[in-house]
């Protein structure tokens, strides 16, 4: 007789019945599903937001890393502090000074990209059913985090100057009237992902005032702030309000995303909770990556490198804007971003960007439908176009293909 325990064939076989309720909100984003298709060489991808790091001085990075292994290998490959490397936290305060922030390294928590910072902040603040106010549209990766913690997203409109104060007031009033708790306003003030807009200085003052009056904490997510094409960076919200703002930064766009190093700057008591959350999530952020980033900042003209990145992205932005102007059919409109990676394209009435996507991919061009950036199903009449990665020639070719698909759609 077979003595091995009988394997029962119940619905538990796939373990689906055992998943926590919060996994219901964990679904593949539209961008993720697209990556497989969009990465085929014949497709011009205006979809993903991958930084173009081809301009990085790999010799400088390489020698910093071999020095690290040779001279500090046993430290670099060891566990580190849950809050992050003290030298790097010090250097991070220099980076933030470029946007007017005066901060103490003790209030910085290093994270695995700013994506993990969004996660830790949400873990610390949000119970199921709590409300996070987000711009409409908003960053798909943050919406995924809010969903995973079962927070409710309430959108507030933006216009060409960023978040609209009346829309923010209205959202706050509506949520409060419904007896729900607002945990924070999540905002991307610079070169918004996906909308491409920048919050004006006047709007920053107004948003800070509203949040101060209403007792709403701000989560300022700023991975693109130093990648402006037209002028010096605007002052961060955090520069004018230390107590009511948690600021998130990242080296993914100003250096390289592969190191996965970002950070949160938080008021002191929040910082302590974030470190505890970080320790339970990862014990500590990767020591090796932090030391590599720290060595790069110490040895390389990183400000000069960011200027080069800005020139490269500006050229690509210009290529996209001129191609759109030359080729888009009537009824389409778009903004001219002053920095960052993205253009938001609004389509003529009746055209559904999500429904059109398979036809676009057949025509060898990819984009992200606007619906990916809303928690409530809106956005079907728009799409995000990224100009960061392809060459200017490929961008023009991609826009040409997209214009062809749109023209065919309009004729249908
Ligand atoms: N916030 C925004 C607005 C982003 O666009 C991104 C990356 N696309 C992130 C956060 C996360 O970046 P990382 O984790 O690489 O720092």
Image (cartoon, helix red, strand yellow):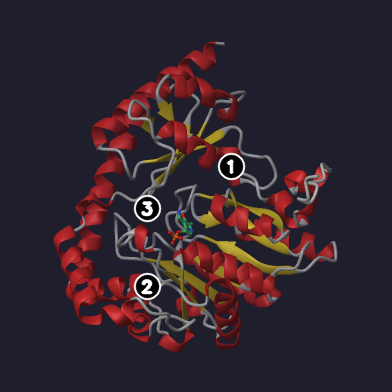
Residue located farthest toward the front when viewing the structure as drawn: 1
| Spatial CA span between label 2 and label 3 | 15 Å
Tell me which label, 3 or 1, sits earlier in the chain.
Answer: 3
- Label 2 near label 1: C-beta < 8 Å? no
Residue 277: name its quadrant. bottom right
Question: How packed is label 3: few (under 14 Cα within 10 Å), some, or many (20 or more)?
Answer: many
Q: Residue 340, labelled with which disc?
A: 3
| Horizontal side of residue 201 vs 152, given as left or right | left
Is the CB–ligand 1 distance for label 2 below 8 Å? Answer: no
Mark 2 surroundings: few (<14), some (14-19) or many (≥20) residues within 10 A: some
As drawn, 245 above or below 8: below
Distance from disc 3 to disc 1, alpha carbons, whole Å, reads 19 Å
Is label 1 within 8 A of ligand 1 (CB to nearest ligand atom)? no
Task: Name the foreground residue: 12 vs 161.
Answer: 12
Q: Pick whichever of labels 1 and 2 is earlier in the sequence.
A: 2
Label 3 C-beta lies within 8 Å of the nearest ligand 1 atom? no
Residue drawn at (57%, 69%) of the image: 219
Note whether residue 252 is visible.
yes
Task: Characterize the local packing of mark 1: few (<14), some (14-19) or many (20 or more) Cα atoms within 10 angstroms.
Answer: many
Where is residue 8 drawn, in percent x and y?
82, 45
Left or right side of 123 for 197: left
Q: Is residue 348 above or below residue 27?
A: above
Residue of label 2 = 99
Q: Nearer the viewer, residue 234 or 81?
A: 81
Question: Of discs 3 and 1, which sits in the foreground?
Answer: 1
- What residue appears at the point 60 percent right and 87 percent down from the top-left corner? 269
Residue on which the image places disc 1: 372
Which mark lies nearer to you, 1 or 2? 1
């Amino acid at each position: 007789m077979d003595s091995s325990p009988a394997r029962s064939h119940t619905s538990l076989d796939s373990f689906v019945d055992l998943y926590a309720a919060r996994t219901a909100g964990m679904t593949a984003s539209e961008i993720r599903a697209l990556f497989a298709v969009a990465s085929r060489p014949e497709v011009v991808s205006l979809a993903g937001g991958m930084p173009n790091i081809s301009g990085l001085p790999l010799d400088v990075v390489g020698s910093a890393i071999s020095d690290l292994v040779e001279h500090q290998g046993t430290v670099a490959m060891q566990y580190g502090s849950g809050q992050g490397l003290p030298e790097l936290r010090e250097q991070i305060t220099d980076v933030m000074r470029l946007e007017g922030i005066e901060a103490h390294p003790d209030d910085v928590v290093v994270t695995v990209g700013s994506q993990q910072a969004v996660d830790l902040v949400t873990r610390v603040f949000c119970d199921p059913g709590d409300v996070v106010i987000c711009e409409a549209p908003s960053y798909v990766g943050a919406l995924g985090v809010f969903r995973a913690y079962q927070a409710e997203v309430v959108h507030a409109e933006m216009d060409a100057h960023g978040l609209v104060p009346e829309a923010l007031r209205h959202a706050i009033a509506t949520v409060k009237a419904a007896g729900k708790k607002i945990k924070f306003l999540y905002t991307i003030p610079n070169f918004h992902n996906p909308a491409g807009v920048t919050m004006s200085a006047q709007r920053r003052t107004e948003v800070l005032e509203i949040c101060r009056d209403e007792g709403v904490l701000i989560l300022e997510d700023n991975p693109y702030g130093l990648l402006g094409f037209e002028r010096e960076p605007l002052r961060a919200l955090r520069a004018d309000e230390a107590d009511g703002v948690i600021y998130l930064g990242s080296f993914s766009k100003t250096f390289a995303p592969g190191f996965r190093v970002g950070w949160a700057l938080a008021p002191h008591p929040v910082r302590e909770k974030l470190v505890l959350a970080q320790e339970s999530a990862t014990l500590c952020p990767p020591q090796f990556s932090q030391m590599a980033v720290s060595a790069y900042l110490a040895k390389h003209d990183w400000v000069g490198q960011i200027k080069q990145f800005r020139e490269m992205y500006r050229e690509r932005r210009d290529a996209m804007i001129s191609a759109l102007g030359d080729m888009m059919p009537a009824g389409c409109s778009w903004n001219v971003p002053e920095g960052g990676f993205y253009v938001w394209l609004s389509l003529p009435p009746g055209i559904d960007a999500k429904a059109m996507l398979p036809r676009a991919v057949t025509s060898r061009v990819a984009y992200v439908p606007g619906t990916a950036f809303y928690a409530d199903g809106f956005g079907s009449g728009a799409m995000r176009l990224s100009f960061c990665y392809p060459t200017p020639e490929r961008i023009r070719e991609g826009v040409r293909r997209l214009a062809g698909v749109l023209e065919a759609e309009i004729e249908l």
